[in-house]
Amino acid sequence: MTNFALIGAAGYIAPRHMAAIRDTGNRLDAALDPNDSVGIIDSYFPNAHFFTEFERFDRYVDKLRRSAAREQIEFVSICSPNYLHDSHIRFALRSGADAICEKPLVLNPWNIDALSEVERDCGRKTHTILQLRLHPAIVALRENVTSQPSATKHEIDLTYVTSRGRWYQQSWKGDERKSGGIATNIGVHFFDMLHHLFGAVQQNIVHVSEPDKAAGYLEFEHARVRWFLSLDVEDVPVAERTKGARTYRSITCDGKEIEFSGGFTDLHTRSYEEILAGRGFGLEDNRCAIEIVSGIRNATPQPGNGERHPAIALR
């Protein structure tokens, strides 16, 4: 049984990590969050030590590091706000543990370079959750793309609308300095998936960059991608909205819909299984997606340059 600690226990994604730790037969020993609305821990690890102050959490983890090997924290799962990931990964590595970090791993490509140095200094590793790479539909599509090379580039339309209420812009997620903006916060795992499927990025053009939506054009070695991301429920297609849907996800490849609406429930557990088996995704696996979202964040929109997504064609 492996001992885990978790940073960001009150966050939305933390229960998936708790479930993954439990379902892989391991133990959550300690958890940290400045907010104490963490009763969900009782559903997974009611005996876990809980801290609201980083200093006390740090002291506890350090005490275990100096104790018997069987008590030491071997992995720190990081579910904190995006802008804190870099610091919390450093804490994990310097505490003698591997880090397992939620997306986005970091906000900027140069953070990856610095973390590589900390890994070398500490002899520990950073792992990340790139769950779409493990989705059965994406695995099958990648096998098809790689086994049947096309003479022309695939034509991709990516649409993802995940509506959020007014609270979103008032939280850290609405602060681009902390979340990285909409493309980073809700789009980074899709951009990683596209890189995983279609190779290196050759062009990155932004058409729309607003607090609640973004759109642009990406060209990869083997695909041309028109993408659109939104937090606005009005961007959910009318037919779906009338059914009460507040989320809409669509990816088409050469005009054919890629069906992957299901199969998400156990992807964190699958990710943990791969990490524990030594097959997890590390720092360099993240580089391309982080370069894409950093480029989007820092780009000046060019509405008339490149192919536009149908959702913004008339803007």
Image: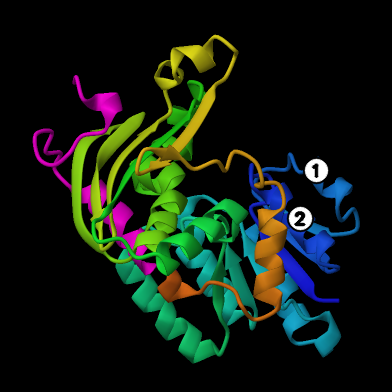
Q: Between 295 and 87, which is closer to the camera in this rendering?
A: 295
Neighbourhood count class around disc 1 (C-alpha, 10 Å): few under 14, some 14–19, many 20 upward? some
SS of the residue under disc 1: helix
Q: Which residues are magenta?
A: 286-315
Q: Residue at x 64, y 81 (%)?
A: 278
Query: Identity of the amino acid at label 2?
Result: Met
Task: Residue 88: name its quadrant.
Answer: bottom right
Earlier sequence position, callout 2 versus callout 1: 2
Q: Position of residue 15 (x, y in %)?
A: 73, 48
Residue to which mark 1 is pinned: 40
Above or below 259: residue 276:
below
Placement of the C terminus among the 4 image quadrants: top left
Above or below 52: residue 6:
below
Q: Are marks 2 and 1 in contact (CB under 8 Å)?
A: yes
Q: Is residue 154 visible?
A: yes
Report whether 169 appears left or right of 129.
left
The mark lying in front, picked from 2 and 1, is 2
Residue to which mark 2 is pinned: 18
Most extreme residue toward the left is 304
Magenta-colored stretch includes residue 69 = no
Query: Identity of the amino acid at label 1?
Result: Ile
Instruction: State the colouring used for the structure image.
Output: rainbow
Report whether 198 appears left or right of 270.
left
Q: Residue at x 21, y 25 (%)?
A: 313
Q: Between 310 and 150, which is closer to the camera in this rendering?
A: 150
Task: Residue 253: name its quadrant.
Answer: top left
Report whether 111 appears left or right of 87.
left
Magenta-colored stretch includes residue 310 = yes
Q: Is residue 181 visible?
A: no
Q: Position of residue 283 (x, y in %)?
A: 45, 74
Q: Position of residue 149 (x, y in %)?
A: 34, 65
Q: Residue at x 46, y 19 (%)?
A: 233
